[in-house]
Amino acid sequence: MGELISKQLLKVRMMERKQIHDIPQEERPAFHVSSPTGWINDPNGFSVFQDRYHLFFQYHPFSKKWGPMHWGHCVSDDFIRWEFLPAALAPDEAYDEGGCYSGSGIEADGEHVLIYTGVIDRYLEDGFHYYRQVQCLAKGNGIDYQKSEKNPIITSESTPDGSSLEDFRDPKIWKDEDGFSLVVGSRGPDGTGQILLYHAENLEQWKFVTVLDQSRGEYGKMWECPDFFPLGERHVLMVSPQDMRARGLEFHNGNNSIFLTGKYDQKTHRFEREQVVSVDYGLDFYAPQTLLAKDGRRILIGWMQSWDAKISPAAFQWSGMMTIPRELTFKKGRVYQEPVRELEQYRRNPVCYENQLIQESTVLEGIRGRVLELLVEITGFSFEHFWIRFAQNDDYEMLLQYNHRRKILTVDRTHSGIDRDVICRRKMDLIPMTGEDGKEIVKLRILLDKYSVEVFANDGEKVMSSVFYTPLEADGILFDTDGTACMNIKKYDICVQG
Ligand code: FRU
C-alpha cells in the first residue's frame, strides 16, 4: 500500500506552498480558477464533498509545460471564490508512474472518492515499450487521498474486442440506485472514439456494460473526458474528441468538445443520439466536466485553453485557467449555459444605458475595465457590422463583431498583443431571437476577467470563450457600427475582494 503522502507528493506540496505566494494576486484572474504554479489542463474530480465544491485539475507544477501529471486541488463555497489546497495526487505508484491522468470524484460513505487514469509507461528488459492506461481509485478526507490497494481497478483487458489497449482514459463516475456507474473514453476497432459504460456494486469491482456511443470516424479520433448525465427530458453525452475536422462553423479543427444529446433507456442502456453540437465556440475551451449540485443544478466547468494555441506570457509563473462554472438547462432542443447565479452576488457599480443609439465609435461613460460583466441587447439593426472593442487602448484591442447580414458573431484577438503565429479569430452562427415585442433582438452577456472573455449569447444558447493576455492598462471599451444600432447596455464590475 502507498504511504498516505509519498515523498514525491510532499515535495510538490512544499514547492507549491512557496510558489503560490510568489505569484502576485494582481497577475491572476479575479474569479476564475488559475494554475497555482506551473502548468494546468483539464478540470478533474469536480464534485461536492462535505457541502463544499472541490475542483482538481491536471497539474505539472515543475514547469509551465505539460509533464508528468499530478492532481492539483482547490475548493470553493460558491464557485466564484476559490482557495488552493495542497496537491492531491502524484504519479508515485507503478500503475501511474507515467502520470495521474484525468478523472472524476464523488462523495460516498462519508469519503471523498477520486477515480482517475493511471499511465504505465516503461521500457521492459527486452527493450519493448510497454504503455497502458488503467483506471485507479483513491479515497480521502478532502485534503489527503490514499490510493487503493486494489489498483488498478479497471484495465483495458475488460474492454470489448478490438478496443485500443493504450487509449483508455478519463473515467467519470456517478452514483445510481444499485451502486455506481462510470463512462470512460476509448478507441474502438476502427481506431476512432467510443465511450464505454461500466457498473459496480462496490467501488472496486467494475463490470463492462456497453458501448454507449461511437465516433465511427465522424467526430474525430480518440474521445477524451466523457461525461454522461440527464438534463431535462434528455440525456447528454459530453465528450472531447481529438483530431477533428471543421464542419461549417459548428466544429473547428483540432481538439473539440461536443454535446451529444438523445434519449437513454436505463434498462437496456441504449443511448439514442439525436443531435451533436459544439459545447463552446470560442478559441480556448476543452475537456469540460460537470457536477450535480445539492440543489439539483448541473454545473459545467472547462479548461479555458487550446492544446494547439498556447499563448500564456513567458513572464508568468503559471499557465492555464478554467471557465466560469456554468449552469446547464435543456431548452428548445439544445443545451443552454449560463454563468452560475452566485456570480450575481459580486456585481458592483452598475451602469445602465437604455435605447442607446450607436452610429460611430462611442465610449460610454462608466463603461471600462477588465473584471466585469457587460450585458448588451441589440434591438435596432440598421447596420451590417457592429463591433465591441475591449481591453482597448492606443496599442491593443480585443474585438467582438456581429455581422447582421450573415448572422455571425466573431471573436478576434489579432491585436490583443499576441506575437506568435497562432489562430486569432473564430466565428459562430448567431440568429437573433424574437423579443417580447415580436422584434429581433441579439443578447450578449460578456464576462471579462483580466485575460479571458466568455460570451453567453441569446440567454446561453451558445457560448464563446477565449483567452488573451493584453496588458491590464488596456481597459477601454468602445462600441461601433457601420450604420445605426440601438441597444440596451448594463455593466457591473465584479468585485470578489472584500
Ligand atoms: C485531455 C487529456 C486527457 C488526459 C489528460 C492528460 O486534455 O489528454 O485525455 O487524461 O489530458 O493530461
Image (tube, helix red, strand yellow):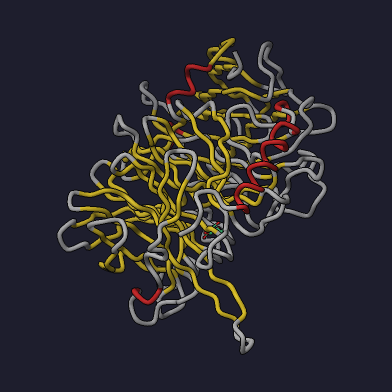
371 left or right, relative to 235: right
Can residue 428 be seen?
Answer: no
Residue 351 falls in which quadrant of the image? top right
Of 338 and 134, the residue lying toward us: 134
Judge whether 404 appears above or below 128 on screen.
above
Across and down, in percent, residue 486 comes to 56, 21
Q: Residue furthest left?
A: 267
Q: Looking at the image, which residue is at 54% across and 48% down?
A: 5
Of 68 and 14, the residue lying toward us: 14
Residue 239 falls in which quadrant of the image? bottom left
Judge whether 286 appears above or below 222 on screen.
above
Q: Looking at the image, which residue is at 76% across and 35% down?
A: 470
423 left or right, relative to 230: right
Across and down, in percent, residue 113 comes to 38, 47
Across and down, in percent, residue 84 comes to 58, 34
Q: Quadrant of the N terminus?
A: bottom left
Q: Looking at the image, which residue is at 82% across and 47% down?
A: 419
Q: Residue furthest bottom?
A: 126
Of 46 and 191, the residue lying toward us: 46
88 left or right, relative to 184: right
Across and down, in percent, residue 224 comes to 47, 61
Can residue 192 be seen?
Answer: yes
Q: How many marks?
A: 0
Q: Quadrant of ligand 1?
A: bottom right
Q: Quadrant of the C terminus?
A: top right
4 left or right, relative to 424: left
Q: Residue furthest right?
A: 395
Judge whether 20 appears above or below 346 on screen.
below
Q: Looking at the image, which residue is at 22% across and 57% down?
A: 201
